[in-house]
Image (cartoon, rainbow, N blue to C red):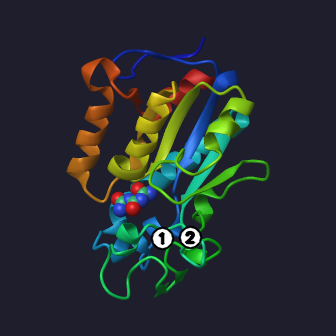
Amino acid sequence: MPTVASAHPSPYEFDPATTALLVIDMQRDFLEPGGFGESLGNDVSQLRRTIGPTAALLRACRAVGLTVIHTREGHSADLSDCPPAKLARGGPGLRIGDPGPMGRILIRGEYGHDIIDELAPRDGEPVVDKPGKGAFYATDLGAMLAERNIRSLVVAGVTTEVCVHTTVREANDRGYECLVLADCVGSYFPEFHRVALEMVAAQGGIFGWVAESTDFTSSLV
Ligand code: TIU
């Protein structure tokens, strides 16, 4: 079995046949100026360091035929799947559904809602549209993974302490073994990023494992 020996808190063993790469919410609305992330007052440049390592990770996973699944956070045009409490976030004119420079903010089908060009999904790679922070809530991700007999999730995406953490916590409770790739996840807040990664691996790996993406990809070959 391939093993990522450098993973924290212990070596991460995985079977590529039952492992999927999950790339979470690498959307223009989070990574580019004018989107939801910036509307909440965040500095989007903090997230952009994940793009290069995640592109390399995608190339390596595709080369060996690993299952690749993408997610996008967003809502229907009529906002019927957006809880009022979530709708209230952000400044006036900068809320979910409001017009932004890349279309209506966080609305499915809008340019800003889609995944950045550098990490565009390939034909055949599922894209899970989710209304929440967690990728399992109100989606068919669980069924999709069960159908493919996936037991381990290698996780990239944004943001570390929000959608990545929520998804890893949901996955942990559902029995998946999660490896979070430190250089392929990012936060608007460097200190939240650091502590969120520490939280995953603390207490003997309470939510999973953490490693660098190159240590994972070199274990694939
Ligand atoms: N605001 C923030 O850090 N994140 C989100 O709203 N969504 C995701 O993390 N994808």
For marks 1 and 2 on the same chain, the one whose residue lies earlier in the sequence: 1
- The answer to whether residue 91 is visible is yes
Considering every residue shown, the one lying at the far right of the view is 123
Instruction: Check disc 1: other Cα within 10 Å, few if <14, some if 14-19, many if 20+.
Output: many
- Label 2: which secondary element: helix
Amino acid at circle 2: His
Which dot marks residue 146?
A: none
Q: Residue at x 45, y 29 (%)?
A: 173
Q: Residue at x 56, y 22 (%)?
A: 219
Residue 30 image position (x, y, % from top left): 44, 66
- Label 1: which secondary element: helix
Where 89 sits versus 101, above or below? above
Where 34 sits versus 24, above or below? below
Q: Are marks 1 and 2 in contact (CB under 8 Å)?
A: yes
- The answer to whether residue 184 is visible is no
- The quarter of the image holding the N terminus is top right
- The quarter of the image holding the C terminus is top right
Disc 2 C-beta below 8 A from ligand 1: no
What whole-number distance in Å separates the C-alpha atoms at marks 1 and 2? Answer: 6 Å
Please state if 195 lies on the left or on the right of 24 as rendered.
left
Amino acid at circle 1: Asp
Q: Residue at x 59, y 38 (%)?
A: 21
Label 2 sits on residue: 113
Label 1 sits on residue: 29
